[in-house]
Image (cartoon, grey):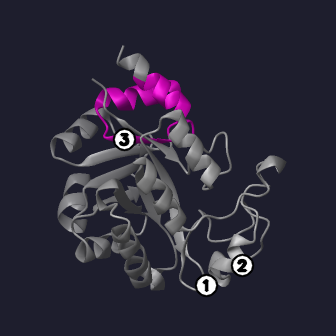
Amino acid sequence: MINTAIFAHRGASKFFPENTMSAFEAAHLYGADGIEFDVQLSKDLVPVVIHDTTLERTTNGLGKVSSYTVEQLKSLSAGEWFGPRFKDEAIPTLEEVLIWASENGMKLNIELKGAIHQRNHVIQTIIPLIKDYQLIDKVILSSFDHRVIYQAIQHTPEIETAVIVTAALHDPEAYVKRIVGARGYHFLSPLLLEEEARDLIKSGVNIRPYTVNERDQLAIYMKWGCQGVFTDDPKLAIEVREQLNC
């Protein structure tokens, strides 16, 4: 039985503007197990959902996200770049997404972003919100900044955490479990051999490749027994998983 969880990368971002409520709603309707999205802090230290540290690529704003208050950020269009019918899509706050997820049971992979000097603010702002909505058991915190992951573990050891990597590590089990103390290893596809993946799974590390959008690659990672996959196309991933389980 294939049990690989399907996480819609920035929502169903193949079909909807990334990191918007419409992309998240679509992922839920398609049947994804969870969503992956990015969080950083506004000028007034409110966690907002947007990938880039600057606004130009995915909004009609200019400059750094951290230069604007949440009220100013909410006035921007986060969807018009994708298509005119999405012009009224706003940048979501983390709290909006948590409220939404508390009503439908979706798993949340929250990628922590932001400036290095904001690590403490990120931890002290985001984790209490997750606790307020009683979603600790539904959340994975991940980041390319492994120090912020370490700090999150010290703050709230019961929350699941994962390191994100763009290059193969020499001994990922030792690094993830003993040095950082995380449970998850999110690796750029394809950076693991099958035997390496199976060894990590046996050791209790939750491995999840990103970003997997091809049918054959999705099937491979599911057959390996990866705990999850990140994909822009959750419809395809669900189709592949159902075919493998026939």
Dividing the picture into quadrants, the one containing residue 109 is bottom left
**Stretch of the chain drawn in magenta:** 212-241
In which image quadrant can residue 2 be found?
top left
Q: Which residue is mark 1?
A: 43
Amino acid identity at mark 1: Lys
Picture residue at 28% right of the left edge, 33% below the top:
225
State which tag comes first along the sequence, 3 or 1. Answer: 1
Q: Residue at x 22, y 65 (%)?
A: 158
Q: Residues within 10 Å of mark 2 (few under 14, many from 20)?
A: few
Earlier residue among tags 2 and 3: 2
> Is the residue under label 3 in contact with that under label 2 (CB below 8 Å)?
no
In the depicted view, which residue is nearer to us: 173 or 91?
91
Task: Assign the magenta stretch its main secondary structure.
Answer: helix
Residue visible at 56% across and 51% down?
10
| Type of amino acid at the residue the image marks with label 3 | Gly
Q: Is residue 166 visible?
A: no
Quadrant in which the C terminus is drawn: top left
**Which disc is residue 228 wearing?**
3
State if disc 1 and disc 3 touch (CB < 8 Å).
no
Q: Position of residue 208 (x, y in %)?
A: 37, 45
Foreground of the two, 29 or 44: 29
Decide: is 227 above or below 40. Answer: above
Q: Residue 220: which disc? A: none
With respect to residue 119, does 144 lie above or below? Answer: above
- Residue bearing mark 2: 72
Q: CA distance from mark 3 to mark 1?
A: 33 Å
| Label 1 with label 2: CB-CB less than 8 Å | yes
Which of the image's four quarters has the N terminus? top left
Q: Quadrant of residue 27?
A: top right
